[in-house]
Image: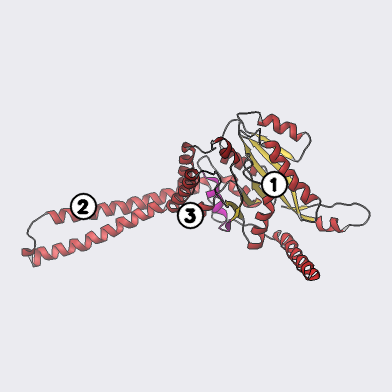
Amino acid sequence: MLVINFRFHSTHLTHKTITKMNTIGVSTVTPVYAGSSFLPELIDRIEQIREKWDNSDYPLELIEAIFVNDDSIDDSLQVLYEIQKEKPWIKIINLSRNFGQHQATVAGILHSSGDWVVTLDEDLQHNPLLIETMLEHAVTSGFDIVYATPEECVHENFFRDWSSKTFKSIISYITDNTHVRKFNSFRLIRGTIGRAASSVCSHGTYFDIALCWFTNNVSSIRLPLKDQRFVDSGKSGYTTRKLFSHARSMIVSSQTKVVRLGAAIGFIGMMVAGILGGKVLFDKFIQPETIPVQGWTSLILASVFFSGLLAVLLGIVLEYISVILLHIQGKPTFFVTDRLSDQILLTYYKNRENHDRLSKTDTA
């Protein structure tokens, strides 16, 4: 959606008004579960970037900050209502019960209206001031989704950070999706794609996998991220149970490479058994003296051949089931998106670059 924003300060258009007439709308979405002690500072940071865009010629406007109360266990909802009284650009969505972070994120995105949507955690791990960097990376390189990748250890705990990377690497290999390694809850998503992916998410769908159904223009950018809640308390929002639940959702939402690999191995075994079986039959009838023991070779080869055949047939059946499951989950045949509004930001970046170049020339 292209937000047209006319601002008249007098009977004539000022330079600032002209530059702000065509703006790109940005929405933020934050799931809330136990963030009462973090929310005031997070909202202050969001307001900083909002005021910065409003008071400059940057063609961006933060039109809303959406907070999804996922049946929070503290007084987060009361904190949000109090802050909303003074900041009407804050939108609060109150879920009927706890559905989980991904589901809360999906609900927030479906209620958003920005050209771009940014998802932020509640615990200050994600700095809203970095949104500009992510946006510039997205529009200058033609990406629809940009994930933030931490520059250093997020949790300041070797095992916690190593296990997170290893988990993503394993799932990436199993699902044959190279984007899994980039997945992070600090995301910049083109609004149309984010809302389309959210609309097809069912109970077992992994949201980031669903995003990859709609675009392959996915990137990541290294940014300073720190899980301050884990550093201070040693408690993480992701338990072992939740990690296994995420893994299951990722696998269910993907056409897994393991199924195809198993079918390929079964086919190879079947072919090898067929070739060796042919050789055994040749020796049996042409040169039987070369077979000192009767029966064992044929039995083993027959077992290998039919086991391979079963593996191939099972792989085909599972592949069909996978295709049917993805169809049920809403994986689209195609999707159309409009990237023309990126020209507004591209023009701004180009003009800024030219201005900086001229300034350096004048200084020299």
Answer yes or no: do the residues labelled 3 and 2 have beta carbons within 8 Å? no
| Residue 297: numbered disc | none
- Given residues 303 and 23, the one toward you in this image is 23
Question: To which residue does mark 1 refer?
Answer: 27
| Residue 13 placement (x, y as % from top left) | 89, 57
Q: Which residue is mark 2?
A: 303
Image position of 199 with respect to 139: above or below: above
Residue 325 visible within the image: no
Three-letter code, disc 3: Asn
Measured along the vertical axis of the image, is residue 250 above or below residue 73?
A: below
What residue would you read off at disc 3? 177
Mark 2 nearby-residue class (10 Å; few <14, some 14–19, many ≥20)? some
Magenta stretch holds residue 211: yes
Q: Residue type at mark 1: give it.
A: Ser
Q: Which residues are magenta?
A: 205-220
Residue at the farthest front position: 364
Q: Say left or right for 57 vs 136.
A: right
Q: Is residue 154 visible?
A: yes
* Residue 74 % position (x, y): 63, 28
Query: How was this image coloured?
Result: secondary structure
2 or 1: mark nearer the eye: 1
Where is the C terminus found, in terms of image quarters? bottom right
Instruction: Indicate the secondary structure of the residue bearing disc 1.
Output: strand
x and y percentages locating residue 54 in the rendered image = 80, 50
Check disc 2 and give the amino acid type: Ser
* CA distance separating discs 3 and 1: 28 Å
Residue at image point 71% right, 49% down: 26
